[in-house]
Image (cartoon, helix red, strand yellow):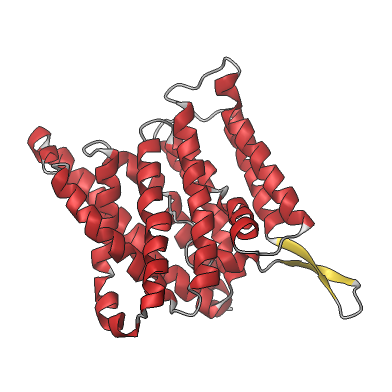
Amino acid sequence: MKNKWVPALVILLLGCIWGSSFIIIKRGLLSFQPIQVAAWRLTFAGWVLFPVVVLTFRKLKKKDAWNLFLSGLLGNAIPAFLFSVAGTMIPSGLSGILNAMTPMFTLIMGVLFFQSGYTRNGILGVIAGIVGAIFLLAPQFMGQPIKGFQPLGALLPLIGAILYGYNINLIKFKLSHLSPTMVSAYPMWFMAIPYSLVLIYTNAGNAWVKDSELAWQSLGYLAILGIVGSALSMVIFNSLVKFTTALVASTNTFVIPVIAVMWGLVDHEKLTWNMFVGLGLAFVGIYLVMWKKEKNDKGGIVKEKQDAIPEQLKPDINQIHG
């Protein structure tokens, strides 16, 4: 019984960590520019995982280095910047909801670029996700603008989710022969190097000149975001996948937007009816994308089971981690 509860508790923990990343980004933006928030996050994460790079460097083959670099760029560096910019334009809860579109984009990117299979329910799930996104953006274009909401700010998390979707497929189809720890460590470390230079080039130290106390608080939040929300959480997630299944691990997708919305309410963000409709449709989309009919040897339908699509959600579904 105890062992059965462990995966559920780990899933809840990961959902809370990644669902909280959006409000933490918001706190980091109190002192730092969006590019600096992304830079601090990846710098902390990359250098925390650097020992893994040192210990496994001789195992790395040249043919994998480019794909790991690309994974870091598409799955970490660019989305981290996009979600940071979005944090200045839309409520953090809305960013969390839009991030929940990742499984739908995973399916689309797999079909378009990796010759991945798809099911009828998967297509219906994508449609549900698109309708959900329309509901999220509808009030802004119907003469009912939301305070603190800018349309571009809603598009940025969607672009981030698209990149996450591509990256998840890249890992599944090009990097699955590597250990989960290596797939987590190298992309972040590759991006930590240029982002460390970004901190110098953009004079991130000026934050302490303006307000030293607030700068330290923001840096503390970003350290948590990088070390816990990006580095350690990925190790935990990969371990969960190893000892259970990608299907079980991927259920944290349902937890992340709920936690993000809850933090938004705590932070007195205005959440409107369309956000909850959009969240509901996102859940429907996730469910359908992960579900298919299993057939027996004679071609008959035996039972419903959740698809191998979640295998594509293997190490990077949340990234999320916003």
Residue 64 x %, y %: 41, 74
Residue 257 placement, left or right of 66: right
Q: Residue drawn 76% across and 55% down?
A: 121
The single residue placed furthest to the bottom in the displayed view is: 58
Considering depth in this image, is 122 or 23 the residue closer to the camera?
A: 122
Q: Quadrant of residue 76?
A: bottom left
The single residue placed furthest to the left in the displayed view is: 209
Residue 40 x %, y %: 24, 51
Q: Residue drawn 28% across and 43% down?
A: 35
Residue 19 x %, y %: 45, 50
> Tag count in the figure?
0
Considering depth in this image, is 248 or 185 the residue closer to the camera?
A: 185
Observer able to see residue 17: no
Vertical placement of residue 199 versus 113, above or below: above
Observer able to see residue 293: yes
Considering depth in this image, is 105 or 260 the residue closer to the camera?
A: 105
Residue 188 placement, left or right of 167: left
Residue 272 x %, y %: 56, 28
Considering depth in this image, is 174 or 154 the residue closer to the camera?
A: 174
The single residue placed furthest to the top in the displayed view is: 143
Q: Quadrant of the N terminus?
A: bottom right
Q: Residue drawn 72% across and 55% down?
A: 122
Vertical placement of residue 197 versus 147, above or below: below
